[in-house]
Structures are given as C-alpha cells and as structure tokens.
Image (tube, rainbow, N blue to C red):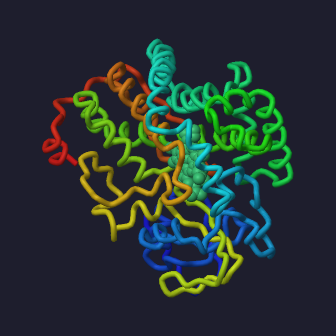
C-alpha cells in the first residue's frame, strides 16, 4: 500500500501516530519534506522528514526546546508543557548546567554497574515466561523490565510500580485532556518528591546541592517518563521484527555476537520516538527552501530521518549485517541527546540475549498486522507468542550467510 503523496502547497495535513506511520512519513519525505501538518487532528506544526534537515535542526540553536518561544494561535497551546519537564524544555546555559549534573548516573561506568540488576530482573521474568506455553512479551517482559529498572533507580517500592506506570501512561497519552494531564503530572511529582528524592540525590552525588528542590523532583519525573515506555516500545519492536522473520531470531540464538547490531538496526527502523522531537523557531528561518516564521512548533521526525534513502541503502529492510557510517537518530543528537541511551540499549540487549539463549524456539502466536500502539511511542501493544514452537530448518550463523539470506 502506498500512502497518498502530500504536497508542499497543502496548508494542513493530518499526521497521527499508529499503523502506517512510516508510509505516511515516507510520502512527506519524498514530496513535502518541510510542510505544515496537524498533529492529533488539532495541533499545528511544521514537519521535517529528511535526514539532513533533521540532523541539522537538532543542533541548530535557532530551534529551541523551551515552549515559551511558541506564539499563541488556535491549537498551539495544546500539548504545551505536557511532557516537557526538566532538561527537555531548557536551552543554552540553563540546559548545560542541569544536564551536567543529571548526566552523572548515566556515565558508561555507572550504566555498566546496573548490568547485574538488569540481568537478574530479566532472568526472573524469563523464569516465569518459560513455565507457560504462551506469553505476551509486552506484558511479561518488555513492559516490566524497564519499569522495574527505572523504579529501582528512583527507589519506587514494588507495590507502587503499577499505579506509577498507570499515571505516566495517562500523562503521555496524546488523547488525554490537557488539564487532566497537568493534574496527573502534579500528583506524580508530589509522589516522587517524597519517595525518590533520596535516590536521585544519591545518583547525582556531590553535585546534588547545586539543584533546587523543585529541580530534583523534576529530574525524577523526567527519568520516570523518559525511561520506561520508550524502552518498552523498543524491546517490543525488536522482538516483533525478529519473530516476524524467524530465521533472524534463530540466527541470534546461534550467534549472540550479532545482538548489539540487531538492537541498533531495529532502533533505526522502529525508533519509539518515530514521530519526532519538538522544537520552537526563535526567529524566521528557511529550511530546504521553505520559510518557517518565528514562534512555530517544529517537529523533527527521527523515524523518517532514520529511513531516508538518501542516507540508508534499502532503508525499510531490517539488515542485521548492515555496515554504515551514517548515524542513527533514534536517540536524538546534539545537546539533548538521550541521557539513557546506553541504559536502554543495555536493557534491550540483555532481554534479547536472555530470550534467544533460554527460549530458542519462540514463535509469534498471531499475525501482527494490527498490533501497533496508538500512543506517543511507536511499538507493538501486544506480542503474543508460543514458547515451544517447532524448530526451524538449518539456519545461517555467520555474517556472510546472513547477507545471503537477507
Ligand atoms: C529506547 C529507549 C529510548 C529512546 C528511543 C529515547 C529517546 C530519546 C530522545 C529522542 C531524546 C531527545 C529529546 C530531544 O531532543 O528533545 C531523549 C532525551 C532524553 N532521554 Fe531518552 N530515550 C530512551 C530511553 C531513555 C531512558 C532509559 C532514560 C533514562 C533512564 C532516558 C532519559 C532521557 C533524558 C533525561 C533525556 C533528556 C536529555 C536532554 O534534554 O538533555 N531515555 N531520549
């Protein structure tokens, strides 16, 4: 199915996440790479879809993360401040100061120190999965793993984790009423101010004294919101992509050294922030020949950029042996590059390594066509599997064999 070709002259085009998103983004990238669209049927934004434009925009100081630059207009106020907390809504020196402090728990060394805990959590979840004939890998693995990891980091006790998860989901859901979203955010903020302060302070170490109480609480909220549903969507998409091509899954059971590259390749193809990250034009600017006035919302589509044929050969195909110098943008780039990228990758790699080792004969129990999650993050809503499926015939294990059967 080919999405209808949008045109640059059309003032407003609808764009909503969910099934077929990549086809719609591809049509924009080809025919109208800088264009005005309407998000969720009501919020106007400029959409950038070409890798070169998106990459440049991510480091362009004329495009701010702070929504105070947004001029008021019908629909524009929706979504203002709803998800942007702490670092994500700051620019320049203010952002650099806070990021420098909050980056401390996420140095490669500190992330590595989470490894035993991530492995133990994964083993517990797979122990449970292994005892069943069928499972839903979203509910049974992709969701609880990142939720427990981030809750461990934030000191959220086990009994509170499900309610905390429900609250974050309510804040992130694009269809939520803006006021209800703000109220839920305040409730969660109050909760974290009491329960997580000590853990955030410990993680940040000596520099925590440089933060105000409110900055500390917002940091907890940011980590909670940024740190689990994104990773759930990624792990879900990775498993889905591999199980839809059983020989790929089998190849990883034979050669686990392929796992890090599989995670990176599927992050490119199915980055959870496919629709993109938002910026605000601080001045009038021209991108690829199109003028964007000051005060507008600009959406940089990471998903469209990561499948741009100008940058990637055969971009819509999962290629576990892909070798390219091009940079994957799924975790952003520039000053706001994802602080948790290393942690998310590690969780995905451990989940995949553990499953392929312990449950080599895993198979999808349903055709996946309609299982996209119509939320803010792009990934399957369910992943029903059979655990002891009939083994596949002889499978490729080396890179050249992989290349042969792609
Ligand atoms: C697959 C999982 C994830 C994806 C795809 C992802 C993606 C992103 C992206 C695209 C940004 C850039 C936002 C922007 O430019 O405005 C970002 C920022 C951020 N992410 Fe992630 N993220 C993931 C997991 C995590 C995790 C596990 C954590 C923490 C535990 C985390 C913490 C953050 C923080 C704190 C920022 C803000 C950085 C800043 O504004 O300076 N993320 N993430």
Look at the image and tell me whether residue 273 can be seen: no
Could you say which quadrant of the image residue 200 lies in? Answer: top right
Tag count: 0
Residue 387 vertical position relative to residue 250 in the rendered view, above or below:
above
Q: Position of residue 84 (x, y in %)?
A: 70, 54
- Residue at 54% of width from left, 25% of height from top? 140
Residue 353 vertical position relative to residue 169 in the rendered view, above or below:
above
Q: Position of residue 394 (x, y in %)?
A: 16, 30
- Residue at 59% of width from left, 67% of height from top? 299
Left or right of 141? Residue 317 is: left
Q: Position of residue 47 (x, y in %)?
A: 57, 71
- Residue at 43% of width from left, 76% of height from top? 30
Q: Nearer the viewer, residue 117 or 319?
A: 117
Residue 179 vertical position relative to residue 35 in the rendered view, above or below:
above
Residue 384 vertical position relative to residue 84 in the rendered view, above or below:
above
Quarter of the image with the N terminus in it: bottom left
Look at the image and tell me whether residue 24 can be seen: yes
Left or right of 186? Residue 26 is: left
Left or right of 364? Residue 187 is: right
- Residue at 27% of width from left, 30% of height from top? 256
Q: Position of residue 100 (x, y in %)?
A: 58, 48
């Amino acid at each position: 199915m080919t999405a209808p070709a949008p045109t640059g002259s059309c003032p407003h085009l609808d764009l909503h996440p969910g099934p077929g998103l990549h086809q719609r983004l591809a049509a924009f990238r080809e025919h109208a790479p800088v264009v005005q669209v309407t998000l969720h049927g009501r919020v106007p934004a400029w959409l950038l879809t070409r890798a070169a434009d998106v990459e440049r925009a991510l480091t362009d100081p004329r495009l701010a993360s702070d929504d105070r630059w947004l001029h008021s207009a019908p629909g524009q106020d929706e979504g203002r401040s709803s998800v942007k907390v702490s670092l994500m809504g700051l620019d320049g020196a203010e952002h650099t100061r806070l990021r420098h402090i909050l980056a401390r728990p996420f140095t490669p060394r500190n992330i590595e120190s989470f490894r035993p805990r991530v492995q133990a959590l994964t083993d517990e979840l797979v122990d449970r999965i292994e005892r069943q004939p069928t499972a839903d890998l979203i509910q049974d693995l992709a969701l609880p793993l990142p939720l427990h990891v981030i809750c461990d980091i934030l000191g959220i006790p086990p009994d509170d984790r499900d309610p905390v998860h429900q609250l974050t989901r309510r804040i992130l859901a694009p269809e939520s009423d803006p006021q209800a979203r703000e109220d839920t955010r305040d409730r969660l903020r109050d909760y974290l101010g009491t329960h997580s302060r000590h853990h955030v302070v410990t993680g940040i170490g000596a520099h925590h004294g440089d933060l105000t109480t409110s900055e500390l609480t917002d940091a907890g909220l940011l980590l909670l919101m940024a740190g689990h549903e994104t990773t759930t969507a990624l792990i879900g998409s990775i498993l889905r992509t591999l199980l839809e091509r059983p020989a790929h899954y089998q190849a990883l059971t034979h050669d686990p050294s392929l796992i890090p590259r599989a995670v990176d390749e599927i992050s490119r193809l199915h980055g959870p922030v496919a629709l993109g990250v938002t910026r605000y034009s601080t001045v009038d600017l021209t991108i690829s020949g199109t003028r964007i006035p000051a005060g507008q919302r600009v959406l940089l589509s990471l998903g469209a950029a990561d499948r741009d044929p100008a940058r990637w050969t055969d971009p819509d195909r999962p290629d576990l042996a892909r070798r390219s110098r091009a940079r994957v943008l799924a975790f952003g780039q520039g000053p706001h590059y994802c602080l948790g990228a290393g942690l998310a990758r590690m969780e995905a790699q451990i989940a995949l390594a553990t499953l392929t080792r312990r449950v080599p004969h895993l198979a999808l129990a349903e055709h996946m066509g309609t299982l996209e999650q119509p939320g803010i993050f792009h990934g399957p809503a369910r992943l029903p599997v059979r655990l002891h499926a009939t083994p596949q015939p002889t499978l490729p294990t080396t890179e050249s064999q992989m290349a042969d059967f792609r």
